[in-house]
Amino acid sequence: MEVGNIYECVVDRLNHQGKGICVVYSRVVFVSDCLPGERVKIKIDHVSKKFVSGIVIDRLSDSSSRLDVKCPYYSSCGGCDIMHMSYSFQHDFKFNKVTDIIRKFVHEDIKLNEVSYDSQFYYRNKATFHVKNGIGFYKDKTYDLINIDKCMICSLEINNTLDVLKKMDLSGIDSVVVRSSYFDKSVMVIFDVRGGVDKGYLINSLKDYVSSIYIKNDKYKLIYGEEYIIDKIGDKRFVISPDSFFQVNTPMAYKLYSKVSEYAGNLDNSNVLDLYCGTGTIGLFVGGKAIVGVEINESAIHDANINKDLNEISNVKFYCGDSGKVLKRLDKNFDVVIVDPPRSGLSSLSIDEVISVGAKRVVYVSCDPVTLARDLNIFKEFYDIKEISLFDLFPNTNHVESVCLLEKL
C-alpha cells in the first residue's frame, strides 16, 4: 500500500475522532467525512507503521444519517470534523464513544445519561482569526490561510465583527481574537501585533461595533472601551478579559453547571473545594457555606476575585498555584470537591490529595473521556462511580463534555 493508491471500500465503523474506518487488504485506513455503511472510493494520502489514512475522491453511496453540509469551508478548514453527521447521529456518536471508552478502561457498567444539547450552529463566543493576505482560519494541519466570510459555529456578533475586519487594513497584525457576550451581545477584539500599528485607525474602524479593543505584543494593552465584557450563566455574572478562560458555549455551560450543582447536592451547610477553578465560575455558580477555589493561572485568579465581588459573594477564597501542591497545605475540611481539569486530566498529586480529603462527594467535569476513564480507575477504589452525564458544548466537532458523580464508599 502506497501514497496515491486508489481503492474502493465500505466504511465499517467510526473511531473516537469521528473518522471512518475502512479495511483494505487487512490494513485499517482512517478516512474523514465518512459514515458507517457508505461505499467510497478513497485515495491513500499517508502510510506509516502506525497508521494509514486516505481521502474520499468519490462517494458511491450515502448513509441516511449524512447531512448536506452548508459550510463552504468544511472540507478544508478542520475546525469542524463531524458536520456531515445529522445532529441526532452526532449525539449517538458521542454517547457511544464515551460508553466504549468507559467500558474499555474502567471495566465497570456505569450509568451514562444521554447527551444534553442546545443549538447546533452559531454558538461559539470566541474565535481566533489568522491574518495573511486576508483573514480567516488555517487549513487543517497547515499554515495555509483560508479566507472566510462567515463561520457557522461562531456567534452572530463574531461574524458581524468579521465583516468589519475584512474591510480593514490589517498590516502588521498576526491574528485577531474576537470574544462576544451571549448576555448583552457586547464584543471584545484583541489584535496580536508584530510591531507598531496605527491605534487610531483600529479604534475608528471598530468603535461603532465593539465594546473593547486590545492590542497584544508581549502584554495586553487596552486601547479603547471597557476593560472587560460581561456574560451571565444563570443569575451569576462573569467578566471576560482578553486571556481568561470562559466556556465557549454559554447556554450549554448553564446546563453543565446546573448538573454539577445537582450532583453536588444541597450545599447550604457544606464546605466546597473547586479545583482547577479558572475564573471561579463553577464554585460561584453552585455556592456553599464556604468555597475554596484553586487555579494555577494568575490572571484567572485575578478575574475570579473580580467575579466574587461582581456577584457580591463573600464566603469564597481563591488560591493561585498547582492544585495538588496547594491542596497539600490546605486544611482539608471539605464536604464536596469539584474538579474541572484540562484535557490532560488530574495530576497524580491532585488525585492523591483529593482522595486524602475524604469528601462525601466528588464531581468530576471532564473534556476528555480517555483521561476521565484513567482517573476514575484510581478513584473507584475509594468512591462509587454513580453516573456520568454528557453535554454537547462543541456541536459539529468530535468533542464532548462529561460530568461524573462519585460518592464515598
Image (tube, helix red, strand yellow):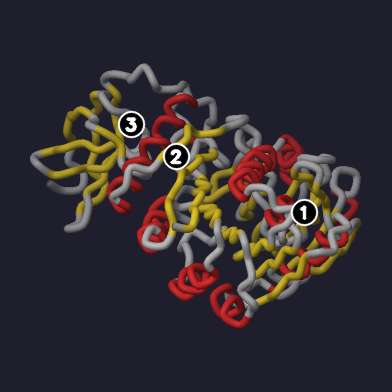
Tell me the CA gap for discs 3 and 2: 10 Å
408 sits left or right of 148 in the view:
left
Real-space Cα distance between discs 2 and 1? Answer: 26 Å
Task: Give the labeled residue for mark 3.
Answer: 34
| Callout 1: SS | strand
Q: Rounded to the nearest whole Å, what is the CA distance between mark 1 and mark 3?
A: 37 Å
Answer left or right for 193 relative to 338: right
Residue located at (89% from left, 49% from top): 207
Report x, y in % for residue 151: 62, 37
Residue 81, which numbered label? 2
Q: Hey, what amino acid is under mark 1?
A: Val
Q: Is residue 248 among what the camera can see?
A: no
Q: Residue furthest left?
A: 25
Q: Amino acid at mark 2?
A: Asp
x, y percent for residue 243 = 70, 63
Asked whether disc 3 touches disc 2, contact meaning CB atoms under 8 Å apart, the reply is no
Q: Is residue 195 visible?
A: yes
Find disc 1 in the rendering and name its residue. 189
Q: Position of residue 339 (x, y in %)?
A: 57, 60
**Circle 2 or circle 1, nearest the eye:** 2
